[in-house]
Image (cartoon, rainbow, N blue to C red):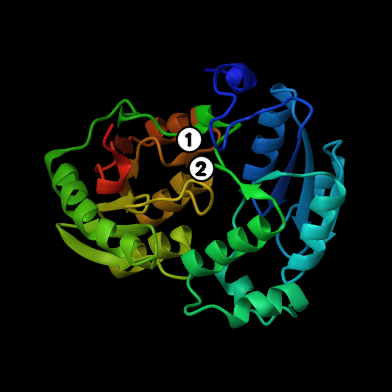
Amino acid sequence: MPVAAMSDALPDAPGTVTSHTETYGLIAGNGQFPFYVLEGARAAGVRMVVAAIREETAPDIDRTGVKVEWCGLGQLGKMIRFFRREGVRRAIMAGQVKHRQIFSGALPDWRMATMLLKLARNNTDSLLGAVVAELAADGIELVDSTLFVPHLLAPAGVLTKRRPTARERADIDYGLEVAQVIAGLDLGQTIVVRNRAVVAVEAMEGTDAAILRAGELAHRRELTVVKVAKPQQDMRFDVPVIGRATIETMLTAGATALAVTAGKTLIFDRDAVIALANRHKLTILGIPPTPQPHDHTDS
């Protein structure tokens, strides 16, 4: 269903577009994702304002024709005040904030400092969950980050011309078991496998760095990359993403296969990604997510 039609079809559903006159807020991190969200909102006829993170957001965000407020990484209070002035009641978080930036010693404002003092853990889920709570305290609901870009989600099945070989399929099956555990611990979303052995696990360095490290360890031979959503993935933030850079990194590292969680992984510039993979005879597979107990409720 087109995003623009959601307000008529599901007027009371949480996390859907409820009014074309409503202003949405965008918390913009790095990369292409914020720009895709702005395009989707514009196509849906929805006004959006942007809180851009000075340490992360691309300067081109100033040339998108929307109102932008630049905030330092630790300026949570400034961001919330901006959204309140603009009448924002729903916000979207799009674009990565590198984990090393979170721990870089950025000076927090009073709102951020107070929030950080309450954290029991400093992992991604705890930090982002606390931000969600701070927004909610000011009447701002953080909604599904893919709301305006559902077409970017990976479909299930083989996406490339070449199907996985028996060896790659065995590595994918093994990798999925391990990756689900790692993702469930909020350690990372990606592992790299060779001959049913884990070569590298993503941590704070990010997916590309983990793939390159695996390439060095395995002498750039026959690697399979498995990138998964968390078992209980919150689609409001930290949604897995692949793009052309992922494929280029795989080529450098000697990886030949990539498996991602269908319906919960974003593919940026999909046509270019698949074309590049086909050109180098890589295989990309969308795996349906494993059903979780919380995914179903009794009627």
Q: Which residue is mark 1?
A: 273
Vertical placement of 219 versus 45: above or below?
below
Q: In x, y percent, where is residue 23?
A: 78, 37
Vertical placement of 167 versus 192: above or below?
above
Q: Quadrant of residue 42?
A: top right
Q: Quadrant of residue 263?
A: top left
Can you name the residue that lies furthest to the front here? Answer: 299
Q: In x, y percent, where is residue 173?
A: 17, 48
Q: Is residue 227 left or right of residue 32?
A: left
Q: Residues within 10 Å of mark 1 (few under 14, many from 20)?
A: many
Lower sequence index among marks 2 and 1: 2
Element class at badge 1:
helix
Q: In x, y percent, where is residue 66?
A: 85, 38
**What residue type is disc 2 on?**
Gly
Residue drawn where x is 47% and y is 72% of the image = 123
Residue drawn where x is 31% and y is 42% of the image = 295
Q: Are marks 2 and 1 in contact (CB under 8 Å)?
A: yes
Q: Is residue 72 visible?
A: no
Q: Residues within 10 Å of mark 2 (few under 14, many from 20)?
A: some
Q: Nearer the viewer, residue 162 or 159?
A: 159
**Distance from the alpha carbon under mark 2 to that under mark 1:** 6 Å
**What residue type is disc 1 on?**
Val
Vertical placement of 97 versus 263: above or below?
below
Q: Which mark is residue 243?
A: 2
Residue drawn where x is 66% and y is 37% of the image = 37
Q: In x, y percent, where is residue 80?
A: 77, 59
Q: Nearer the viewer, residue 71 or 269?
A: 71
